[in-house]
Amino acid sequence: MHQLLAKRFEHESSMEGSMIRKMFDLGMELREQYGDDYVCDFSIGNPDVPPPLEVKQALHEIAEQADEPFFFSYMNAAGYPWVRQRMAAEYSQEQGVKLEAEDVFMATGAAGALSTVFRAVLNPGEEVLGIKPFFGDYITYLQNSDGRYVGVALKPDFTLDIPAMEAAVTSETRIVLINSPHNPTGAIFAKSELEALVAMLRRKNEELGRPILLLSDEPYRVLVYGDTEVPSVFPLYEWSVVVGSFAKNISMPGERIGYIIVNPDMPGKESFMRGVARASSIMGYVNTTTLGLHLLKRLLGKKVDIGVYARRREAMARALREAGYEFNMPNGAFYFFPKSPLADDVKFVEDILVKHRILGVGGTAFGMPGYFRLSFCVSEDVINRAAAGFKKAMDEAIAMK
């Protein structure tokens, strides 16, 4: 039989993200077998908090205008000028710098934004230096540009290990990628950490004779608990770009509304943005959806009820603490990343937790064995129902040692 697929797709099980998909699919099977009330699925970060109430009104307004000529017209690759102007005004305040419409590029979700930047910046074989654990699909996105991901482990308290990152920089390093709030740990990197990172980048820029791009992936920026703040990279380093989406803050992941924002002080930013536009067209994204942008025009500045996630965070912390798990309290996003009671995190998740109809994802899927990820995009009832199973799973793991 003739092979139609490219070789990179011949072995689906080897692709990054397959462990997350495996657990998600298993959750669907278990719910069908036992019923929704008997399965506790923490495997995937799919926002379940309802969008802001303003979404309904926005859809009504859009429906009233939908029969106007060119309401859903083509646009240039960067997006309609009016939405980019609104974005610049909104994000100037958030990022602590004065942005203009030309600094903003609307993308097809954060995934499209990252893929576009990778394609615009990387030559085949060049490297993105990031951290471990990391969102596994980064490697998938890098296939578009034949780039390589080089991960440096966070410290045990999930802070940046700057000396280790500096040692990992090579002549092939073109991008340093950070993600804060961080998937899967929920860590938020402090301003002092970012300052140390920038100082390291400036040293390496001098050695290499060219700048390394600092790329900040920020889809969870609004999901922050307590008085913790997410520092902006823009005031610290001119060679920086921020990407993000509106999947989490307004619970509309399916609309795939993302963005790329270039530091307004970046030398040659016009050339960079032309490259981004060309890369987006080459990969077939072209631009994000017209409906999404019309919604965004009416929803900028709105967000879901963060208090719902905050209460779930407390419930999950309580369940894990009482069961004896070791973990760092997440300051942002909607994930916990506890230590696995077994060195083999995959065995613990897929054999022991599943036995108690609890679904998570082993840290191996994120490049850091010995941990496992739990998403609290579920109701408090599900978290409370899982408490007994977490305790039984811990007891079984201890007995196996």
Image (cartoon, rainbow, N blue to C red):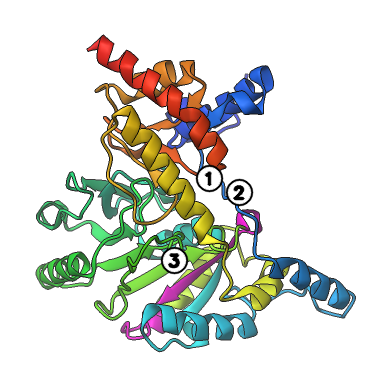
Residue, disc 3: 243
Quarter of image, res 205:
bottom left
- Residue 57, image x, y percentages: 77, 71
Earlier-in-chain disc, 1 versus 2: 2
Closer mark to the observer between disc 3 and disc 1: 1
Give the x, y percent position of residue 253: 60, 55
- Contact flag, marks 1 and 2 (Cβ < 8 Å): yes
Q: Earlier in the sequence, mark 2 or mark 3?
A: 2
Tag of residue 377? 1
The answer to whether 129 is drawn above or below residue 383 in the figure is: below
Q: Is residue 173 above or below residue 77?
A: above
Label 2's element? loop
Residue 345 appearing in the image: yes
Q: Quadrant of residue 66?
A: bottom right
Q: CA distance from mark 2 to mark 3?
A: 22 Å
Q: Whole-percent x and y of residue 83?
A: 62, 80
Locate the C terminus by quadrant.
top left
Tell me the residue at 29%/75% (across/down).
Answer: 239
Mark 1: amino acid: Cys
- Report whether residue 2 is seen: no
Residue beneath the point at 52% across and 74% down: 105
Helix, strand or loop at label 1? It is loop
The residue located at (85%, 71%) in the rendering is 63
Q: Amino acid at mark 2?
A: Asp
**Which residue is situated farthest in the top direction here?**
400
Magenta region, residue range:
252-271
Determine which residue is flagged by label 2: 48
Q: Residues within 10 Å of mark 1 (few under 14, many from 20)?
A: many
Q: How many marks?
A: 3
Residue in the foreground of this view, choosing between 231 and 22? 231
Q: Which mark is nearer the camera, 2 or 3?
A: 2
